[in-house]
Image (cartoon, rainbow, N blue to C red):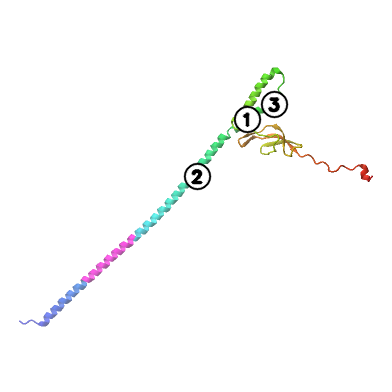
Amino acid sequence: MTQDPNAEKNEQAAAETGECSAGNEAADFERKLKEAGDAVLSGSRKERERGRSAAAKEAESLKEKLAEAEDQKLRALAELENFRQRKNKELADHEKYAPMRLARDILPIWDNLGRALEAAPQEESVQGFVEGVRMVYDQFIDILAKNGVTRISAKGEKFDPNRHESIAMFPSDEPAGTVLEEARPGFMLHDRVVRPAQVVVSAARPAAASEEAPSAGEEKGE
């Protein structure tokens, strides 16, 4: 039986068409596979970028919180140091000026002892007793001095209202405002006044008349 030549051609063409179709399908599959891979890679890249961005934001937030916490710590330390310094100063001042009340209570007794010495009789028979009182009188001042209480200088000084209390003023040849006499001693505890010194202060003398009053004859022009 004779074979048809056209049939062979047709079969060959069909075979070639099938091969071409299969090749196209394979190429299409590879293309889709590549696109899918690219999509996966692109998505993964975006996820990584979003992750890095979120991590960066979180890191920045943590840095800000850390800086704020550090600032609060420094403020707290500064306040604590200020509080400590204030308390130390208060304690130092309390210790420094603790004798103030005692000095104010003792000084009137010292004043009375001084008055007793001034009024003491001069008889020799009582001089031993007077000397004993004088020793106690001096001992009061020694004890006060050991505790930082010192006498305020007054006589001959310029009147100072912060340390002196004027009880009288008299005209004097001394410059106005000079302390002439001390009526009662004053005392200081370091830089604070325990009690001011009571003093008599000089005042300016009245100005003398520059011209004498004219006599009766001069008034008449005689």
Residue found 67% across the figure and 28% down from its top: 111
Q: Residue furthest right?
A: 222
Give the left or right position of residue 55, taking residue 161 as reference. Answer: left
Q: Residue furthest left?
A: 1
Q: Which residues are magenta?
A: 26-48
Disc 1 marks a residue whose amino acid type is: Asp
Quadrant in which residue 140 is drawn: top right
Depth check: 177 or 58 in front?
A: 177
- Near mark 2 (Cα within 10 A), the count class, few <14, some 14-19 or many ≥20, is few
98 relative to 51, above or below: above
* Residue 115, numbered circle: 3
Query: Can you identify the residue that label 2 sits on?
Result: 79
Query: Can you identify the residue that label 1 sits on?
Result: 105
Residue found 27% across the figure and 65% down from its top: 37
- Near mark 1 (Cα within 10 A), the count class, few <14, some 14-19 or many ≥20, is few
Give the left or right position of residue 190, taking residue 179 as reference. Answer: left
The secondary element bearing badge 2 is classed as helix
The secondary element bearing badge 3 is classed as helix
Residue 47 on the magenta span: yes
* Residue 205, numbered circle: none
Quadrant (top left, top right, bottom left, bottom right) of the C terminus: top right
Residue 161 on the magenta span: no
Residue found 68% across the figure and 36% down from its top: 164
Disc 2 marks a residue whose amino acid type is: Glu
Residue 63 is situated, as x and y percent measured from the top left of the image, at 41, 53
Q: CA distance from mark 1 to mark 3?
A: 17 Å
Residue found 51% across the figure and 42% down from its top: 83
The tag earlier along the polypeptide, 3 or 2, is: 2
